[in-house]
Image (cartoon, rainbow, N blue to C red):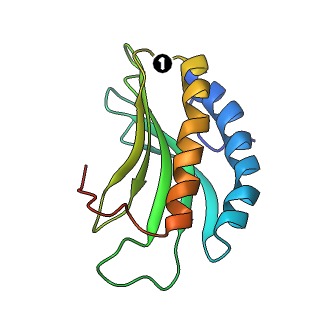
Amino acid sequence: MTIISHHHPLVLRMEAELLPLFQAALPSLTQAAPQVLTSVFAFSTGTQGAFLEYRFGISCLLDAVPDDQPDELALLVSVSGLDGEASVAAEVRWGQPSGHSEAQAVLATASMPALHAALPGLLAALRKALERGRPADGARPA
């Protein structure tokens, strides 16, 4: 059963390849930060038209953080432009009020090999930020 009801080959491939990789990464993230609730997600935004975007990722919810600090960190992979030239971007970003980007990979083409090459660095950035428990000192919103 698929999570996303779209038949675009890139979306189907991403769903089949990314979701199991993200699921497999959860135990090591939980080990790095046991107080964090981690989960894998996939969803679409928009309608089945030119502005449709799909997002896949890992959400990490932190417990007992001060009100002025973000309580979520996510690795987010976005694919858009499926009606023409698709584009893929991936990043590790803190939620509000920070919005700080820990790492990002903007891929020149919607290439799965390029995305797979970027994922180890993004997962490492996610783990490092989780261990720190807050955006880097001096971090500015991206």
In the rendering, at what x and y percent does residue 109 appear? 43, 15
Q: Is residue 93 above or below residue 70?
A: above
Please tell me in which quadrant of the rendered image residue 26 appears: bottom right
Give the percent coordinates (x, y) of residue 89. 42, 32
Left or right of 107 in this view: 21: right
Horizontal and vertical percent for residue 73?
Answer: 47, 60
Q: Position of residue 119 (x, y in %)?
A: 58, 35
Q: Secondary structure at mark 1?
A: loop
Q: Is residue 66 left or right of residue 33?
A: left
* Residue nearest the viewer, comparing 49 with 95: 95
Q: Which residue is mark 1?
A: 110
- Which image quarter holds the N terminus? top right
The one of 124 and 44 positioned closer to us in this rendering = 124
Q: Going by the image, does 71 lie left or right of 9?
A: left
Relative to residue 81, is residue 25 drawn left or right?
A: right
Residue 59 in view of the camera? yes
Q: Residue at x 40, y 52 (%)?
A: 93
The residue lying toward the viewer, choosing from 81 and 47, is: 81
79 lies above or below 3: above
Q: Tell me where residue 60 sits by quadrant.
A: bottom right
Identified by mark 1, the residue type is Ala
